[in-house]
Image (cartoon, rainbow, N blue to C red):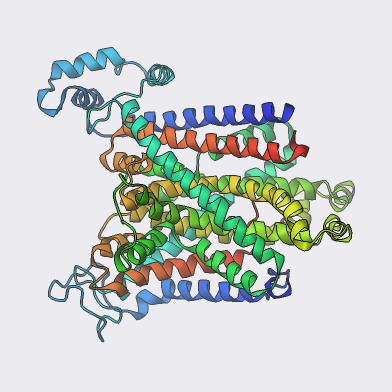
């Protein structure tokens, strides 16, 4: 057991450190990459198709002669920002409605929970697919679909955790002392839930990044010539023999980001 | 039997929600898509070349497409309730017939993947948990963490390239021979197996450090006997419970894996329907995937009740 103990409150378990490093690397690639690596992710050079790595294109060129490295860093920016935005858009309503349900109880709670159950009746990706069907290839339905599928998890966790906290003696004492709801939330409820939110955010981001890759891969997410990891893999699949690195690189990036987020999150909260 | 009735009722409500959610989304989709809906449906019925404005008007009157949205939605749900899912806009085939053909393939793939998850994962987890911190434990858990972070499509490509192309042991596509299912089922099942291995490992550690396990050894049972008597049944409950949570991943994976391997199932048809904006097919396939999800959930509930008397 000792060697494998999962991250404690101090968060210094080796798995967490590895996770933070991986996530840090990919985020750095997303933020700094497009500044450091010159060039456009969609500029083709048909005279250099499937070229092996060279000084101008460190990871070689794809089937249309585009630099794999340039596309990789732009795809990193896309996945990281879409994942983070979807998590933020899911977290905000999820937390607020969860607090509301736990605070108000009664019919408010029943209606909100029923609504949450309705969304959970379908597997998340199926819901995203149905929303994406409204406008295939566009960015916004992907974002809306992901947030729509993900807010329920935030709602349920917030509702369950804050209901327990609201029933604690500390909260009761604060209420008896005449403190209002805002004080109770800020002082007793939200600080206790921060670690939980961190875990949810990391898992949610991993799920969103995987979903974007999967949809790109099966050709109903973002469309070419967008630089997206799943899309890059499926485009280069026919050339696995001539340019293995060009297909492997996006897979490795996606894997590193998801593994990093999962390690950072620790145990599955569900 | 209270537990069984309650579980089934809950899943019946979930099934109803799936139908409402999918039909409402598909109905919205039809209304916001550009172009004349009646013309598109008439095309689906009579073929692109034989459709006329009169045919479109007949469809419009018959289906009440000129009525208010709420009435139309009621009619839409009414047709659905009679099992009329319409015809595919691409092939012109009845959606029910197409989906019935695909359903078998998808179920076969999903069950094969579940079998992998329920055999490989728990056995590996058991051996890892019997010696916590040992070589099997460390290696197995690192492998499980890596597998869980691996996108299903990347795993599928890896399996294809290694076993299909480099080694040439297994076919990478096709669906007529029994061996065709191995690679897609592995791509779908290995991630789930990793999750169940982790849960089985923790459950094994919990059981072997429980007082009743020590008592079994004191009673004079050998360690193997004690493990056999106590671990599988006690570990099965958390493994199944966790698998129940992971069923969403299974259904999501079906869509991706079928598209990758060209497996003629519902997931494959769903992604085609989205690309072609074939709303009747989209509704039919999404409904069946949603209902498979509910059915698998119900089966998990019943298995849990059978295994764990406290849930009855």
Comparing B223 with A120, the one in front is B223
The quadrant in which residue B31 appears is top left
Name the residue located 29 percent from the left edge and 65 percent from the top edge.
B165
In the picture, measured across the screen, residue B62 lies left or right of residue A258, that is left
Figure quadrant of the N terminus of chain B: top right
Q: Determine the residue located farthest toward the bottom in the rendered image.
A: A55
Vertical placement of residue B272 versus B160, above or below: above
Figure quadrant of residue B159: bottom left
Along the line of sight, the residue nearer the viewer: B191 or A207: B191
Residue B308, image x, y percentages: 73, 41
Residue A151 located left or right of residue A51: right
Numbered marks: total: 0
Decide which of B114, A221 is in the foreground and name it.
Answer: B114
Residue B14 drawn at (x, y percent): 56, 31
Query: Residue shown at 63%/75% (left/top)?
Result: B135
Residue A226 image point, x, y percent: 29, 60
Look at the picture and state if A187 lies above or below A106.
below
Residue A125 appears in the figure: no
Between residues A150 and A249, which one lies in front from this camera angle? Answer: A249
Residue A115 percent coordinates (x, y): 58, 35
The residue sitting at 14% across, 15% down in the picture is: B54
């Amino acid at each position: 057991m000792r060697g494998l103990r999962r991250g404690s409150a101090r968060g210094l378990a080796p798995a967490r450190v590895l996770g933070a490093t991986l996530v840090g690397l990919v985020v750095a690639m997303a933020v700094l990459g497009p500044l450091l690596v010159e060039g456009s992710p969609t500029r083709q050079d048909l005279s250099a198709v499937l070229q092996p790595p060279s000084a101008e294109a460190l990871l070689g060129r794809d089937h249309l002669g585009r630099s794999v490295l340039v596309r990789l860093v732009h795809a990193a920016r896309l996945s990281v920002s879409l994942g983070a935005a979807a998590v933020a858009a899911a977290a905000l309503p999820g937390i607020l409605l969860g607090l509301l349900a736990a605070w108000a109880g009664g019919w408010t709670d029943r209606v909100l929970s029923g609504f949450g159950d309705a969304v959970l009746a379908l597997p998340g990706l199926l819901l995203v697919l149905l929303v994406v069907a409204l406008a295939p290839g566009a960015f916004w339905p992907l974002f809306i679909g992901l947030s729509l599928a993900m807010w329920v998890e935030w709602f349920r966790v917030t509702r369950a955790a804050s209901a327990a906290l609201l029933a604690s003696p500390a909260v009761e004492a604060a209420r008896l002392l005449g403190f209002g709801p805002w004080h109770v939330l800020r002082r007793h409820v939200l600080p206790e839930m921060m670690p939980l939110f961190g875990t949810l955010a990391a898992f949610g981001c991993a799920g969103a990044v995987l979903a974007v890759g999967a949809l790109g891969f099966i050709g109903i997410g973002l469309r070419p010539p967008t630089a997206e990891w799943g899309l890059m893999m499926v485009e280069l699949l026919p050339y696995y023999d001539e340019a293995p690195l060009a297909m492997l690189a996006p897979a490795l990036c996606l894997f590193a980001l998801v593994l990093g987020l999962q390690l950072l999150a620790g145990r599955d909260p569900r | 039997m209270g537990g069984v009735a309650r579980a089934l009722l809950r899943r019946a409500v979930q099934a109803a929600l799936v139908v409402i959610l999918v039909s409402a989304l598909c109905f919205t989709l039809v209304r916001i898509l550009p172009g004349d809906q009646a013309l598109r449906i008439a095309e689906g019925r009579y073929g692109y070349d034989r459709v006329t404005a009169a045919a479109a008007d007949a469809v419009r009157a018959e289906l009440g497409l000129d009525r208010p949205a709420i009435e139309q939605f009621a009619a839409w749900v009414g047709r659905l309730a009679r099992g009329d899912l319409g015809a595919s806009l691409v092939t012109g085939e009845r959606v029910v017939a197409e989906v019935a053909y695909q359903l078998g393939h998808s179920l076969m793939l999903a069950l094969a993947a579940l079998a992998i998850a329920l055999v490989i994962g728990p056995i590996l987890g058991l051996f890892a948990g019997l010696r916590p911190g040992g070589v099997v434990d460390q290696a197995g858990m690192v492998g499980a963490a890596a597998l869980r972070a691996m996108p299903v499509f990347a795993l599928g490509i890896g399996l294809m390239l290694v076993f299909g192309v480099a080694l040439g042991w297994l076919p990478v596509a096709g669906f007529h021979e029994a061996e065709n299912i191995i690679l897609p089922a592995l791509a779908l099942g290995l991630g789930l197996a990793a999750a169940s291995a982790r849960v089985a490992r923790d459950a094994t550690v919990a059981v072997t450090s429980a007082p009743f396990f020590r008592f079994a050894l004191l009673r004079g049972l050998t360690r193997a006997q004690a493990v056999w008597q106590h671990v599988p049944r006690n570990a099965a409950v958390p493994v199944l419970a966790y698998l129940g949570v992971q069923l969403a991943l299974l259904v999501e994976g079906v869509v991706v894996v079928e598209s990758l391997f060209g497996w003629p199932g519902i997931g494959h048809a769903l992604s085609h329907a989205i690309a072609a904006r074939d709303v009747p097919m989209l509704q039919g396939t999404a409904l069946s995937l949603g209902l498979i999800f509910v059915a698998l959930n119900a089966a998990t509930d019943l298995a849990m009740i059978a295994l764990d008397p406290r849930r009855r």
